[in-house]
């Protein structure tokens, strides 16, 4: 295998009994039985038991006494069968061991901050010593899974005729809805590149360039608050195709997902993935990325409550409700009310149908026979209401639904549900400014027939934007793009971007669209998100080799750090904050 070892540790079996060989790896554990010393030697492939017998190898025995956890060792010896009562059925190499003749310490380790494979280690400590953490099974498994998935996707893309094109990281701001990370430029002090939030415009330009099918496992940078499913830098399967419709793009993504499942030998989700319009997703689930592993659908009670004696219902543009499969206690309802308030509700009206079938609620006395009949439910359930404008009601019930899905374990069905959300609105109102803004990005095309609405009725225009959802996680988004400059300019106008600003920010794109741009569309799927789901991990950090924590710190290197004044001066930068006082963890 190499001059250091003949084999890896985890692959040895009874078949190898009698062979003389050399293995190398880390001392996982060492047990001194007063005379015999046992060392579990570990590498990425698994562990094998070394036996050091002072009668057989006195020199090796002397070395063995020095060994501590995580020393790097090389051992030469003979593979032998273990005595029947020493067989360990829990590990693949449990029937054999290596009787050591020569033992060499290749590298020593000081006492460890935590043991490799130890559970419940503080995450910042794990990240500070990521290379130790990585020696354990969890990170080995996750990083290798990452590799397998990306490999499978690359193979699939190659087979489908996609060309891997590298696009710049240092560029101009790309409007993907986040803040940019900026890179100062020494040669032009006072000027900055933005790190690409995505290769969006470059990939569109490869289509104008006649490349036909572009893809990249692209690193993207977005300055957003870090959460379980967000890192400052992350990777996307980024693709773009010419002369295609929405269904062609969705087909490619489905193939990539299936290829990844097959590569890890898991049953792929059945194709085609179901589709749902944005309007339906919002009305039935209160979310544009609903978890469809469970029902708990939203029902509409607006009509029946029009003349309600309960003023909150009567005056609300929309009254909707969920029927949760449980008769909640007062304390549980108080907690649910807090959840509803987090999503913007003022309170939470409810009717508890207890096990005996009796309705418990402060509002029933205001409700008519017809209302009570409409809100009747099985014994052992609770009707939870939201009243207000449609968006608020959807948001509150969507938030409650997701919360209940988790709390009541409704989602733990073992089923994997992939689906598409399509037909998003093209624009929405910016909550702060009241201006029209994009839902996806401003390069998304309206659905055929809605071009005129871009300026005449922006709120009524539907877009050719689509999202891919897995068990309630948004895996990615894409769209058919605008390929005519006039339409692109109209979208910018609706968003209140004046011609001078259009020119300054997107002049290069508008120009390209005037020089023979083919119809095109594409997609980007978050690879780390996808792999985290595949690995059954709760957050992206568990599948990324060197992630950052929520403060933005990298516990391993200590980045970000202040820069000496001389360096900043050269870049034409003066800081106005004390870097020490702005430090994270
Ligand atoms: N650039 C988009 C994003 O990063 C994806 C796309 O529209 O292709 O979400």
Image: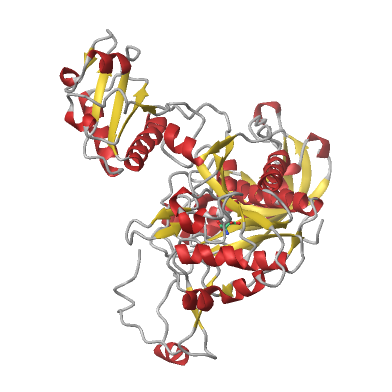
| Residue 290 % position (x, y) | 48, 37
Depth order, front residue of 13/329: 329
| Residue 546 % position (x, y) | 53, 60
Depth order, front residue of 452/264: 452
For image coordinates 47% across by 69% down, the residue present is 180
Tell me the quadrant of the picture where the N terminus can be found.
bottom right
Depth order, front residue of 540/87: 540
Relative to 162, does residue 397 appear above or below in the rendering?
A: above
Depth order, front residue of 24/429: 429
Relative to 336, does residue 459 appear above or below in the rendering?
A: below
| Residue 292 % position (x, y) | 51, 32
Please indicate whether residue 393 sits to the left or right of residue 312 in the image: right
For image coordinates 33% across by 26% down, the residue present is 301
Ligand 1 quadrant assignment: bottom right
Relative to 567, does residue 583 appear above or below in the rendering?
A: above
Q: In which quarter of the image is residue 434?
A: bottom left
Which color mode does the image show?
secondary structure
Is residue 199 at all visible to an observer of this figure?
A: no
For image coordinates 43% across by 45% down, the residue present is 120
Is residue 311 at all visible to an observer of this figure?
A: yes
For image coordinates 58% across by 33% down, the residue present is 416
């Amino acid at each position: 295998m190499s001059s250091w070892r003949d084999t890896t540790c985890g692959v040895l079996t009874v078949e190898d009994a009698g062979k003389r060989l050399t293995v190398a790896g880390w001392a996982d554990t060492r047990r001194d039985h007063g005379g015999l010393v046992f060392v579990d030697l570990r590498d990425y492939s698994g562990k094998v038991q070394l036996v050091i017998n002072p009668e057989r190898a006195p020199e090796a025995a002397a070395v063995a006494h020095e060994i501590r956890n995580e020393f790097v060792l090389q051992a030469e010896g003979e593979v032998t069968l273990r005595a029947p009562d020493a067989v360990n059925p829990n590990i693949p190499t449990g029937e054999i061991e290596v009787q050591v003749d020569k033992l060499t310490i290749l590298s020593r380790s000081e006492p460890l901050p935590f043991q490799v494979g130890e559970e419940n280690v503080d995450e910042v400590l794990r990240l500070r010593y990521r290379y130790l953490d990585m020696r354990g099974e969890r990170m080995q498994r996750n990083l290798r899974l990452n590799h397998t998935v990306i490999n499978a996707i690359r193979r699939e893309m190659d087979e489908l005729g996609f060309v891997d094109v590298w696009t710049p990281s240092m560029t101009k701001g790309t409007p993907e809805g986040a803040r940019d990370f900026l890179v100062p430029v020494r040669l032009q002090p006072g000027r900055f590149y933005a790190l690409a939030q995505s290769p969006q415009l470059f990939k569109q330009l490869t289509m104008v360039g006649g490349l036909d099918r572009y893809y990249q496992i692209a690193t993207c940078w977005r300055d957003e608050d870090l959460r379980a499913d967000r890192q400052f830098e992350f990777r996307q399967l980024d693709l773009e195709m010419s002369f295609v419709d929405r269904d062609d793009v969705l087909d490619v993504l489905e193939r990539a997902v299936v290829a990844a499942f097959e590569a890890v030998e898991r049953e792929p989700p059945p194709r085609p993935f179901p589709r749902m319009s944005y309007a339906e997703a919002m009305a039935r689930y209160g979310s544009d990325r609903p978890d469809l592993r469970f029902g708990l659908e939203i029902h509409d009670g607006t009509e029946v409550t029009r003349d309600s004696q309960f003023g909150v219902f009567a005056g609300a543009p929309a009254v909707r409700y969920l029927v949760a499969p449980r008769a909640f206690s007062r304390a549980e309802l108080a907690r649910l009310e807090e959840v509803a308030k987090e999503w913007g509700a003022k309170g939470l009206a409810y009717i508890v149908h207890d096990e005996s079938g009796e309705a418990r609620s402060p509002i029933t006395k205001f409700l008519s026979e017809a209302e009570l009949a409409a809100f009747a439910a099985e014994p052992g359930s609770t009707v939870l209401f939201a009243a207000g404008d449609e968006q608020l009601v959807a948001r509150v019930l969507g938030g409650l639904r997701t919360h209940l899905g988790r709390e009541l374990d409704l989602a733990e069905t073992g089923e994997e549900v992939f689906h598409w959300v399509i037909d998003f609105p093209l624009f929405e109102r910016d909550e702060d400014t009241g201006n029209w803004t994009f839902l996806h990005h401003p390069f998304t095309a309206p659905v055929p027939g809605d071009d005129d609405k871009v300026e005449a009725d922006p709120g009524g225009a539907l877009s050719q934007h689509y999202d891919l959802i897995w068990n309630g996680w948004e895996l990615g988004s894409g769209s058919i793009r605008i390929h005519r400059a006039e339409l692109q300019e109209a979208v910018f106008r609706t968003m209140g971007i004046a011609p001078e600003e259009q020119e300054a920010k997107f002049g290069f794109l508008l120009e390209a669209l005037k020089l023979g741009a083919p119809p095109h569309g594409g997609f980007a799927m978050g690879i780390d998100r996808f792999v985290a789901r595949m690995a059954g991990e709760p957050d992206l950090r568990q599948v990324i080799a060197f992630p950052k924590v929520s403060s933005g710190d990298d516990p391993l290197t200590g980045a970000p750090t202040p820069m000496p004044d001389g360096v900043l001066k050269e870049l034409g930068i003066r800081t106005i904050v004390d870097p020490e006082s702005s430090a994270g963890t």
